Amino acid sequence: MKNNNFSKNPDTVVQSQVKTWWERRPMIYEWENQPTFEEGTEEFFEHADKLFWKASAPFAHPNWPQSKPFSRLIDYPQLQNKHVLEIGCGIGALAEQLALSANSFAAIDLTERGVLLTKKRLELHSLDNSGVRQADAEHLPFPDESFDFVWSWGVIHHSAHTDQCVKEILRVLKKDGTAKIMVYHRNSTRYYVYGGLYRGLLCGKLIKCRSLYAINMDFTDGYIARHFSRAEATELFYGARSVTTQVMGEVAMFPGWGSLSRTFPRFMDHLNRFLANHFGWYLFVEVSK
């Protein structure tokens, strides 16, 4: 999924442009091939989930499929008496898991397509889908202090105004509630080494794109995708009682890195683990109000 739109400035984007992009490209984790299953069927959801769980297994659920998806980051038993909100449900992979565990569950997505698919998924599994609705994270349709737990995975950095999403998250979060949010990490190997050094300098993209942000948007999902340092993410949630950040996720260097990892597994496993924990592409933010 490439943007190939090097001229846009993320600070001039409006939410309607973001919405249109995602309506056309729901997140199904099928990077190379067109889906082989009819959209909205059980087979469609199973295939997309398999790709998602496999991609996130190293940092989210190392023992999957023996453990629940994202079990390293979500304490499912603690949600039994909680009111839970997911921001950006996509096709409902995490929505299904959260709905199974929470006392009550609500989810929003900017797109009509995402809402319809999530509702369909929950219906297929005999789960209540009445709490799933189309809404903008910049203007959440809930009263103040409505939720004990707010989850959002790779969503608010695609919004036209991420800071407004954060204000809304803190508004709807109950006192002593917790929010767990993943945004993209700017100080990552993917952003600087693969994007800047390899694609920008060695492949000559810097001449055409003219900025490091534009180079990264050439191979990153979303109409826009903001990246944050740990300090910036902490500042973004200013006003919360506590904010902690953790770096994790993808390590992207240059073509051939995977071959090196397979050729020298013992050394490269340690190196990749170090890089993921310090320069991974995902920045996981845990907030207590």
Image: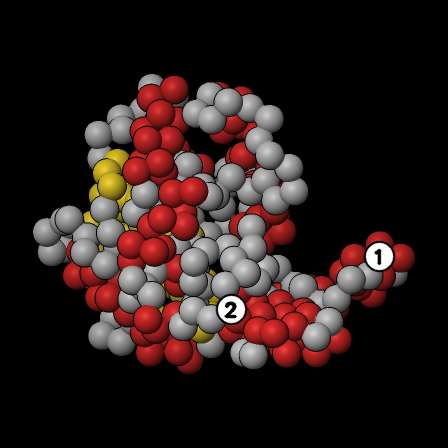
Q: How is the image coloured?
A: secondary structure
Q: Residue furthest left?
A: 143
- Nearer the observer: mark 2 or 1; the answer is 2
Q: Position of residue 267 (x, y in %)?
A: 83, 65
Q: Which residue is mark 2?
A: 6
Q: What residue appears at the point 17 percent right and 61 percent down from the top-left corner?
A: 171
Amino acid identity at mark 2 = Phe
Q: Is residue 27 above or below residue 182?
A: above
In this rendering, would 118 be left or right of 259? left
Residue at image point 59% right, 60% down? 219
Counting from the top left corner in percent of width and height, residue 232 is at 39, 78
Q: Quadrant of the C terminus?
A: bottom left
Task: Give the x, y percent position of residue 234.
Answer: 36, 75
Q: Which mark is residue 97?
A: none
Q: Secondary structure at mark 1?
A: helix
Picture disc at residue 259: 1
Left or right of 125, for residue 27 = right
Q: Going from the N terminus, do you reach mark 2 or mark 1 first?
A: 2
Q: Is residue 131 left or right of residue 158?
A: left
Residue 276's x, y, as percent? 63, 65
Tell me the residue at 60%/34% (across/down): 34
Spatial CA distance of label 2 from label 1 is: 31 Å
Q: Is residue 73 visible?
A: yes
From this viewpoint, which residue is outermost toward the right?
263
Residue located at (65% from left, 42% from top): 32
Between 264 and 176, the one lying in front of the other is 264
| Of 209 and 228, the residue lying toward us | 209
- Crowd tier of the residue under label 2, counting other residues whose Cα lies within 10 Å: few below 14, some 14–19, many 20 or above: some
